Amino acid sequence: MPGGSAGTRLELPIGEAGPRLDSWKEIATYLKRDPRTVRRWEREEGLPVHRHRHHKKSTVYAFASEVDAWRVERRVAKGAVRLPQALTSERSRGDASEALQQESRRPLRLAILPLRNLTGDSEQERFADGLTEEIILEVGQCCPQRLRVIALTSVMQYKQSTKNIGEIGRELGADYILEGGIRRYGRRVRLTARLIAARDQAHVWADSYEVQLPPIFSLQQALARELAVSLSTELQVKPGQGRHQALA
């Protein structure tokens, strides 16, 4: 029994709580402390010690697994152990998974900046502004549930702006920025466009379009529609499809 020699101890089965420590001496040896310290820990710090029924008070036992748990909690309370990885990893993974799911359901926000007039002819400024408006209209109609296009009045303030893509993205709350320019020569118009990630200013996609001059408004619409189709394909925001995997 407790306090006796190893030869006279009863060998008790090991249960779910782990090996059993059948005396103050065994508990103290397991904790590498003296019995007096272990008794004080039980009184003052909640060391999990059990007492046999119908036996004197000194007849005690403890389970190693409970002692281990108490020891970890005690070290945490004293700031000796950091919890995030050891004890809250499951909760952290759950929170991260929920955040990713919410992020995947959030529509992309796209800012289409005013097109630059690359011809050097001031008369083409109105044409460039009109084409910008047409592109915003066409792209905005692609799939509003998955792609939100920032309004023309909000982006026009960045015409001739010297701010970088990161600053513009933060101010507009945009995930991606579309910038480009037009060059008109003879009866042809060339449109260039670049899609840039606002968070790191990385180029995601670029393309150019060239058309023969039709009547002015149908030209703008044709260019805008062609660009909108290409852009929606790149972002994969057509109805029935998910967000672009490469942009996640």
Image (cartoon, rainbow, N blue to C red):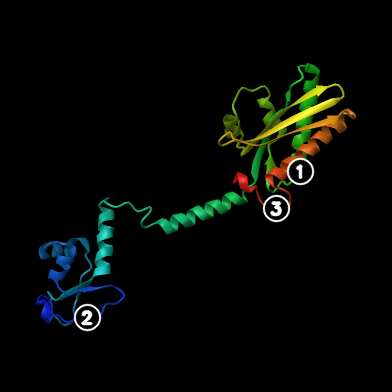
Q: Which residue is mark 2?
A: 12
Q: Earlier in the sequence, mark 2 or mark 3?
A: 2
Q: Are marks 3 and 1 in contact (CB under 8 Å)?
A: no
Q: Which residue is mark 3?
A: 241
> What separation in Å lies between label 2 and label 3 (alpha carbons)?
63 Å
Specify the amino acid type for callout 3. Answer: Gln
Q: Nearer the viewer, mark 3 or mark 1?
A: 3
- Quadrant position of residue 13: bottom left
Label 1 sits on a secondary structure element that is loop
Q: Earlier in the sequence, mark 3 or mark 1?
A: 1
Specify the amino acid type for callout 2. Answer: Leu
Q: Is residue 238 above or below residue 156?
A: below
Q: Where does the image place residue 215, in percent across and percent down from the top left?
A: 90, 29
Specify the amino acid type for callout 1. Answer: Gln
Label drawn at residue 141: 1
> Which residue reaches farthest top?
121
Label 2 sits on a secondary structure element that is loop
- Quadrant position of residue 116: top right
